[in-house]
Image (spheres, grey):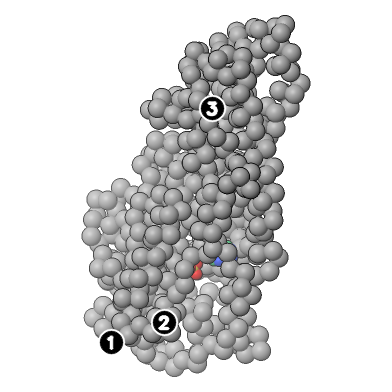
Amino acid sequence: MAATNGKFYVTTPIYYVNDTPHIGHTYTSVAADTLARYHRCRGEDVFYLTGTDENSQKNVEAAEKAGYQDIQSYLDMMSGKWRSVFSELGLTFDDFIRTTEERHKKAVDKFWRAVKANNPDDIYLGEYVGLYCVGCEAFVNRSDLVDGKCPIHKKEPKAIKEKNYFFRLSAYRQKLLAHIDSHPEFIQPEARRNEVRSYIDKFMEDVSISRETMKWGIPVPDDPKNVIYVWFDALINYLSGIGYGTDEARFRRLWPADVHLVGKDIIKFHCALWPAMLMAAGVELPRQVFAHGFFTVDGDKMSKSLGNVVDPLVVAGKYGMDTLRFFLLREIPFGGDGDFSMKRLAERYANDLANDLGNLLHRVLSMTEKYYEGKVPSDGGGCPDAPKDQEEAWQTYDKAMAVLDFAAVLDLIWEHLRWDNKHIDEVKPWVLVKNDRKELDKVIYYLLEHLRHVAWMLKPVMPVVAEKMFDQLGIAAGEAKKTWDEARAWGGMRENATISKGMPLFPRLEDK
Ligand code: MSP
């Protein structure tokens, strides 16, 4: 998604804190972080919001199970953990919103009142009689159940009969369909759009947005014995996190969100309920909701009972966070489903990273040391096609980033790395050094300059590796000052600059 007016606002879902982050949550956050870094490279005013969803019954049950009498102190402890894991993973979020914060409560209050003021009939009192799955935090139909249980959480839903406030979602059916049809970019990928469209068209009904029997949550304005349904409150985080109700100037600068990244499991909340809520409150809609797929671990659903839940800190500790980022974005097509396997990760580490990228850099720097005493040669008259080819590569790169096709971004880079490796084998610099110095200058300059471009292309996905590449190419200080256009222009490596070959980028793990 391109930026609006030079700003780029990206969000992740806010996470439930009944457990610590696993690799599935890390996936959404890594994608958001990559986008945020890419748009920062472009010089845009980027805002990346993440946070924790705290008014959920799941959290309350987890707190009680953990022996906490004071729910808030459990939430403080767990939310702190999420935040510190995300920081440890190097994620560059600009704010971390918690739905138990005062600023969020104020925003929710303002939003509810805005809906009532704009459309007095859109929130009405009714009686809810039906089933509720705490795992999904959603009302479920009997027809959704398998053997009387929720097919996802394998638990019997609770039977509920209580007075609730309802949101007149059905009144927005035609408006939502019209918006989806006239904004094909609103729901991505396309398969998800069709799924949501048919849900809105055929199944969407009014939704209960308060609970009478629950104690934990944000009170309904003017009727504080009821608390607001967790999804109605949680979605508003995308507004409260940028100042709605507390800092209107900041809110106006950043809203609408350029992209909400979500997993496919929560697409209906984001593409039906959320836009309808915004329409009701008179707030502009986000520009895009992009739903990624789910992945299994070694072919199985990730679950505590199977004992196959992957801890991102363990993987990052062994292979480095950049390897984990690379693997998640390269292995699982963004928008589709996939599988996570440590065996595949080890293979990609050895082949794609250590071999194709690490060895190439090492080879080129070694030749620069050996043939040029570690100084960048002249470009030997240059390769006439190089600037044009590189410019085309950048255009392909931008197009792939604009549609969040991270695998295509990485494929493009690796196609180039493999070409470079093959090129070295074909032109044989070790022969050129004896009989064609000028041609050797050309080859080595080309490779060094090309690696500089590769480092820039990798920067949003593998920020630590990119920095190490700049260091070893001896250009870290200079590159840090460049604008995006300067960085992408051919010829950035300066003749006679000194390289600084270091340790291999991806050491063999036995050596670690
Ligand atoms: N709290 C809600 C979101 C509210 S947003 C207003 C929620 N939280 S969650 O913690 O359960 O999930 C957050 C995200 O993690 C979801 O987008 C979900 O898709 C993602 N993932 C959880 N497990 C996953 C996989 N196994 N694979 C890929 N993504 C997964 O839902």
Total number of numbered labels?
A: 3
Front tag of 3 and 1: 3
Callout 2 secondary element: loop
Residue under numbered circle 1: 225
Instruction: Tell me which label, 3 or 1, sits earlier in the chain.
Output: 1
Callout 1 secondary element: strand
Spatial CA span between label 1 and label 2:
27 Å
Q: Position of residue 40 (x, y in %)?
A: 41, 40
In the image, what residue type sits under mark 3? Lys
Residue under numbered circle 3: 501
Spatial CA span between label 2 and label 3:
51 Å
Viewer-proximal residue among 401 and 324:
324
In the image, what residue type sits under mark 1? Lys
Residue at image point 59% right, 19% down:
368
Residue at image point 53% right, 31% down:
502
Instruction: Tell me which label, 1 or 2, sits earlier in the chain.
Output: 2
Mark 2 Cβ and ligand 1 under 8 Å apart: no
Q: Position of residue 294 (x, y in %)?
A: 61, 63
Above/below status of 171 relative to 263: below
